[in-house]
Amino acid sequence: YIGDHYPLCADLPAGHYLKAGAKYVYAGEADPEGPSAPALGARPVDHLVAPTGSGLHGALRPTGGAWPAVVRLAADASCPSCPSLDDVAFVKVTSGGQTRYYRYAKPACVKMAVFTDGRVTAWKDSRNDGEEDNYQCADVTLPLAGVGCCNTGGRLQSGTGQCEVTRERVRYTTAAGRCSGALQVCSGDISSSDDMDYDTTCAHHQPTWLSDTCGLQVQVWEDGQVGLVASVSEDPRLQASTLNTFYPAWAAGFPTTAGAGCTAEGETMLCTVTVTSEAVYPTAGDVPATVADVEAQLRIGAFDPAALGGYSCETSCGGSADVAVYSTGAFGVDSIVRVKVDATLGGGFRYYLNRVDTVTMEDGAGVHSFRNAPTFMGLSGEAFLGEDKRSSPNGEREWLRFTGEQAAHRETSALIDHLFHHPNMPSFIAHLMIQRLVTSNPSPRYLEAASTAFKTGVYGSGGSARGSGRYGCMEAMLAAILLDREARSLTLDADPGHGAMREPILKVLHVFRAMEVQTEHGDELRTLLGKIGQDLWESPSVFGFYLPSFSPSGPLEEARLVSPENQIAIAPRMYSMMNALSSLVRHGLDEVSFGEPNGKQGELTYDATAGAAGWADAAMASAAADRLDVLLCGGRLSADSKAAIVSAAPLYTTSSPTVDLYACPPGTTFQVSTGRGDKCDDGVGGWTPPQGCSRSGSNSLNVGGGSCSVTPDQGRARAGLTKVLLEMMLFAPEFHTTNLRMVNTARGDVAGTPVAGVPYKAVVALAMEGGVDSWNSLIPASGCTGPLSFAQYTNRRGAVAIDSSDLGASELITPNTAHAPPAEHTPAQPCTSFYLTYNLTDVAAMFRAGDAAVFGNVGNMIHPFTRATMDTAERPEHGSAHNFAQRHMMSMWPQMGSGGKGVLGRMADALAEQGVRANLYSIGNFPMIVSSNQVEATVLDRREGASELLADAWYSSALVQLLADVSQSHFAETYGASLLESLEVSTALRALLADVPAGVTSFAGTDKIGEQFELVSKIMAVRDAATGDRIADRDFFVVQQGGFDTHHSKLQPELKFINDALALFKTEMVRQGTWEATVVVAQSDFARTINSNGHGTDHAWGGNYIAVGGSVKDQAILSQYPPSLDVGHDLDYGHGIIIPHRGYEQMWGPIVHWLGVPPSQWDTVLPNARNFPATTAGDLFDDGSFSPLPPPTAGPLTAAPATSAPATPAPNTPSPPTLAPATPAPATLAPPTAAPATPTPATPAPATAVPVTPAPPTAAPATSAPPTSAPPTAAPATPAPQTPAPAPVTLEEALAVDFFPASSDKCAPAAGTTAYTETFSSNQAVSDFHSSASQWESDVFLAEMRHAEANANRSWSLRVSPAGNVYSFVGAFGEAMPRQFHANGVFVDEVWQNVAVSQALNNPGAGTPYFVHQAGVYQREAALQAPNRPYFSPNVAKHADASAAHFVSWGQQAHVPTAFGSTVHYYNRYRDCGNGVLESTTVIHHGAEAGRESLNYFNVPWGGVRTSTLKSALRGRADGTGSDAFDLHPWGSTAEVNGIAKMNAHGGYTSFAEAMPVSETFAMPTVDGAPLVLTMAKNSPCSPSAGHEGSWGVPTVKCSLKATVTVPTGCKAGPDCLLTFTSPSGGSFRTRGVLHWAWKGATIFLWPLGGSGAAMASAINAMVDEWDTLTVSYTEKPEEDNVALSFVHGKDGDKPAGANAGRIRSGVGGTLNRDYTVYTQNFWGKAIAPGMSYVNRQYVAVDRVVDIDATAQAFVGETMQAVRAAGDVAGRTVRLFANDGLATFTATVDVATCGTATVRCTGSTTPQAGSRPVYAIACGAKAYVGHDPYAFTPADANDYLRAYVCDGEAQPTRPQHTLLGYFPDGACGVLAAASYVPESCASMTPAPATLAPVTSAPATP
């Protein structure tokens, strides 16, 4: 709890307001009670008065004539005449005739939220006995109420001494003591005597104690949250079913079942509680000796025992003791434990009570408890309930306001303290500070050093140490940042990725300081945000100016580096800043630069030529540039930059210079002015001052043609030189970045894509930022079916609903059902007409005219789901946060988070690849939607259009020269390339916009959005240049409108602006003739809640949006509007949030099709579209046909080596539609077989032969250049015809394919298609893996293989892990693999994998199991848990060809940590045989050295199926006449073991079907000999049982029954518990089992299938009526409807000699939540010694049950088993080549030469006698080559081997293994530390004696 470790307010010591440390705050001279009033009876009207001469008076009186603002008592203050008070609000002090008041600020303390021994307090506003009192329940240990004494007749009495000060608050015991004699504390109603005024009593206008007892109940919600309920209280926070809840620290489960002390209150439990206090440590001797152990157990703070008094020390209590114990007597709950605070945290001591307070309650299922919650804020008994009309405004309200604010401040401070000490805080702060001060991409070491300084408060040692030694010391952290070698190293300045882009505000301030700008007042810098994108204290949002993870396109993104500041370095802002700086240099500070519109307010005074004499010559320019370099660039200006800057400067070397730079243009006058400086005056606004000119006898001079021919002046010439050099310097990359530029090569011209001549089309994306309330845009009108209606809309929306009087015919729209998309795209709309309203009347008119469409209920989505399945659905991350939702909307790939490109950018890329000219434009900023790989977006200003640099012609050319060369610095290159490209584009665009034809529609009066649409119109108007040349085939625009975040209002005036702008835009497009070629699509972050928050609406999800355009289909509503808006409907997410019916793919899919994006790119542009019903252009557009674009006209395609797909691929990486041909195109030219004297050029491979062979798992090091083919030597003049040499096979392909036996001749695809991809996309909607597993699917995914044919029952897809095993298999039945609910075994146990065991070493009972898993290791080891990422067995080779995929992995000992190693290689080949059959071939190779243990027990595979998917088990008959069902028993049970089947005794295959019919009926449990009858009672509807769900791990629902007998048993595991419940009306639902048939005779607890507990409870309620009697049956389907999966394992006829008979085992495995039926084939008894291999070929088939027997029997005879010895399979020759330095090496297959490199060792692609596997292992920057796969395992006292740890490297760095082949023992030792570079013979050219080392980190020059 946030209040843990704070002391209890109830324990404040007596007279605490007089104790040392007491704090008083000055409250002014006015009495907080208002004007003084005479005493009323015995009631005092004054506060506590500090008596003159008392210590309290002395501390508070004025010193030096001033009253202190805050006083903290340095010592206990004496006050002998002060009354004894429980609490003090104000103190009155009089001194020197002046009276002042001070508020007393109590020490920070907390109150326990729950109490049961309270007393009632009452409040009365007047003496009127008829007026009802206001009651609360208050904690008697706290001073919360005043004294009210009554006589025996119950009448309130006044008496002296009942209250000491005005509005005195006391504890209940104090009140009871004050009522003496015949008086006692009042009870019931407070009534005063007739002859006594109520105002004279101490009960006047404040809560008063009553003797009536009370206590709190707790209301427990379905998610475990708790609300406090005080039945006597009128405080609205303490009523039942409020949302004033908190999460308590439950000891275990929480109440979910009515009974005992809990009653059902809707979906909650209202429980009576007890509160107990117990000692944490029974005796003083039990108190731990360490601070950490004490603070882990004791949570209630305490005050210093010295202040409390009466405590004595029980242990060593010296100042050096870490832990000390104090007691007042016997050790117990009141004892105090003192702990020493570490010096880094300030030192001193903290105190804790030896006590824990527990809140206990009992429901129908048992006892539950939680630790009582401390709170700072006032809860029960502390609310203001009186009207207080007669007291002053400074009375009770003021007191409560002050105490409430104080509590809120302290709670906030406690939260800040918690965050400040959070373990992530040091690195969080350090990372941001390093980014701001040194480099955007700090190394882990640098980050750790700065974090450590923050934690320890010290940097350095001895006399050079900096910092206070306290945690959080910024001095220490800043010293660590600024003095670290990464901040000071000159070498690192040359690292391309080191450093940063500078922030605009810092650049501006830098210029002001360095150039000595003198201003008139010092505060002239104003309104910088609009000019440069930053301003002081003007962050545009809570996310700041930019995000720390932003990475701009170009070299930074390619290097996977970030540059946050680049997010605001967009063209308009860069131009604006540079124009302002230029104006500052030329004219000084004024409105044009950074000042205010008040004329000139300052100027630069720095002179770079100070001290020089003579004319400004080259030497002077060079020296001045050097000075400016030091001041502005830190001395980092490159020679190239300096040369470009100096060459641009005007040099004055003669007595009659020509001033070309600052000359006055023709027709202007040179004016000498005393105010602004000399200038060229055009009579309007002035021009640049002509530096170098001086006055020549008159005040004006006509300079005619532009040359200044006045008398030259050397001083003015030198001043002009400074300004020109400075202005150029401000454009240098070195000024804008912080590392060395280091020019690389000359920047070449980038040829733009020529126009393709296809018909022009334009897309305008309208982003409505903030979350538009679109439920008030599309409103049900009439013709509604089901529950939806306008009345339902009104009731559900409440205060934010649109009144019917505001709706009329102008808003009414009627969807044209004839134009509706297919039903699977958009089901029928629930109403025949809707209102398209809220200021969208013109859009509604467009809809009626056929120019607008509406999308009902769409939003950011990964796949469709409903309320029933939302608990297991994959949802966009942080989908209700603006920044995340906007990124999701713009990327259309929510899985990627902040990564990926924008959807418009990907469209433009896809079109560019087809040779189509596509332009991207954004108005105002650079949103993610236009980020692209190939097409640079142009950012425009909505008013100025294309930004312009305010410069003369020479200036632009000088700038081009300055940036002409490519920079090695990633930051400098990003800046330079972006500026040059934007300069070129904006120049061209400005020229075009200058020629906009007359007649363009004016958008005046339409706000900012209209200005944006007007600019779009102008650009479209000039799409055909004046010459007639087209400048675009496709244009993409982004316009933006904010202001939709309506938490406090239902009004959205911004929609009116959008409506008006769209109307004018249509008018203009019709005028241009492009309306038919244009579509505008509106989207928003998200929609708003369907219900009101009382003022407006909150962030939600699904909403309604529009598309307008001339080709938009007439009157179409796409995607379905919700059929109901009520709570609990299918799309109700809860809290007023509507789940979208479809994703935004419903909007973009037709547009992608309409634009002509080729089908091969559709998955790239919209990666999640495959998860939704397919859309076509015809869904949205009148002409729905897809018109393929013409093929690109570029040169022939060249093959490039493919690279492995990343775990989370970039969105621009397309998924290959089919498997590529087996033969790859060459990466380098191979030597011909009969080498001619002069080889002839190789013929390029055709485009269709481009391979998709995956690259090796360990990519080439970052510093390695990609292999390139050297140009072949020219052929002789008359060459003889020659055949090009065959392409050399890659090592990875040869290793992956050479060791397999041939496939069966029957395995030849006859129908359908085969597809293979290594691009991951989630299939969670089908697979429904448990949430603990689904988060890791992108890690376990390596590849997917699919077979599709017309017969869907024979289609399948499988997913392969890095280990090559199958972890997902989907057929027509759904996902066959278990849900992976396996603690520490996610995707490494319940999958199809091979396992190898040495029975001689396997001894699980002794803690030394020996299981070599193919899949990976169990996550039970700290080294695995540190990165919190499973470790899957590494892939060491892979290859895919036309119909098969091959994988090789290194298997792992599953039970870690272990001293057993593994050298087992698992080879797997999956070949599509067609007709639903998959051939699965396995080779298990034992690669250990001779003498090691043999392997003699194998699972081939270990696997199984999901029980709830494939319930029924069948075995083929031995005679081949069909299959027989068999019972599945619990795995390992006697029945299961006795039922193990020998392979030779059956038909050779085992099948699992969905739910076969069964002959017997389900037997209900019996009660007194009669079956239990389930009759449903609806007095308490079915509801989720969250506690049981938490216990069992599966959704649980409870339903009330008509009273019957108690049947606590259930049906808890196995296929027999897959039951179907049917109602009399025919409605049915399935369950995976029953927890309790009839708990206490009143409730049935079920485990339903199909969705979350809440969703299934709702579904059951909908189908079951009260008193329905349910029938229960086994879940079954007709046999002909069952689809089955069959494992074809054969009959063991080719069993290797010496092996035991093969066997098949099947049984129900694990627990209910694992949903697992085990299946495995055993090969055992035959020893596989080192060097040997076991081979197994079997088949998997899918088909209908009635067809599966024939399919399986056809392949029974094709299975095979074999044992191989080393050398049985001839491989190809592998040679490892390296130059003399041996730093890097490469490999060839059957190729004897490799450039100039030398063969270092020779081996084979298959195991040979005397050979062992050799690996190349990369571990961070380290490399190893050799036989030991554990080369980098850390040393361990237990000799444990950890394949998943890189010795010396921080987690999560893990070794990366590549198999190089099989080599004689030790043959490759010479390469032991070399780095492997695949396929790089082309780079093996003559090299220096020592090759440059290759590392995985970026090179540091």
Image (cartoon, rainbow, N blue to C red):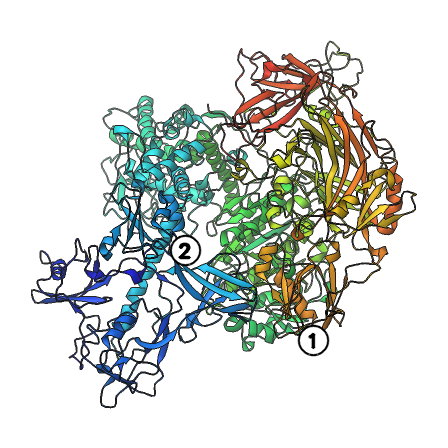
Residue type at tag 1: Trp
Image quarter of the N terminus: bottom left
Between residue 60 and residue 971, name the one nearer to us: 60
Q: Secondary structure at mark 1?
A: loop
- In the rendered structure, which disc, 2 or 1, sits on the residue that comes first in sequence? 2
Residue 1562's image quarter? bottom right
Q: How many marks?
A: 2
Residue 971 placement, left or right of 1720: left
Please rate how many residues cluster around mark 1, counting C-alpha atoms within 10 Å: few if below 14, some from 14 to 19, many from 20: few
Residue 429 placement, left or right of 1530: left
Identified at 73% across, 54% down, the residue is 1184
**Spatial distance from mark 2 to mark 1, Cα to Cα?**
46 Å
Between residue 958 and residue 1165, name the one nearer to us: 1165
Residue 1734 placement, left or right of 369: right
Measured from the top left, where is residue 112 in percent x and y? 37, 62
Between residue 1796 and residue 1477, name the one nearer to us: 1477
Residue 267's image quarter? bottom right
Q: Secondary structure at mark 2?
A: loop
Measured from the top left, where is residue 157 in percent x and y? 24, 83
Residue type at tag 2: Tyr
Measured from the top left, where is residue 994 in percent x and y? 51, 47
Residue 1347 in view in this figure: no
Residue 1611's image quarter? bottom right
Mark drawn on residue 1667: 1
Query: Is 476 situated above or below 824?
Result: above
Residue hosting label 2: 1
Mark drawn on residue 1892: none
Identified at 7% across, 64% down, the residue is 96
Residue 398 in view in this figure: yes
Measured from the top left, where is residue 1869 in percent x and y? 60, 15
Please rate how many residues cluster around mark 2, counting C-alpha atoms within 10 Å: few if below 14, some from 14 to 19, many from 20: some
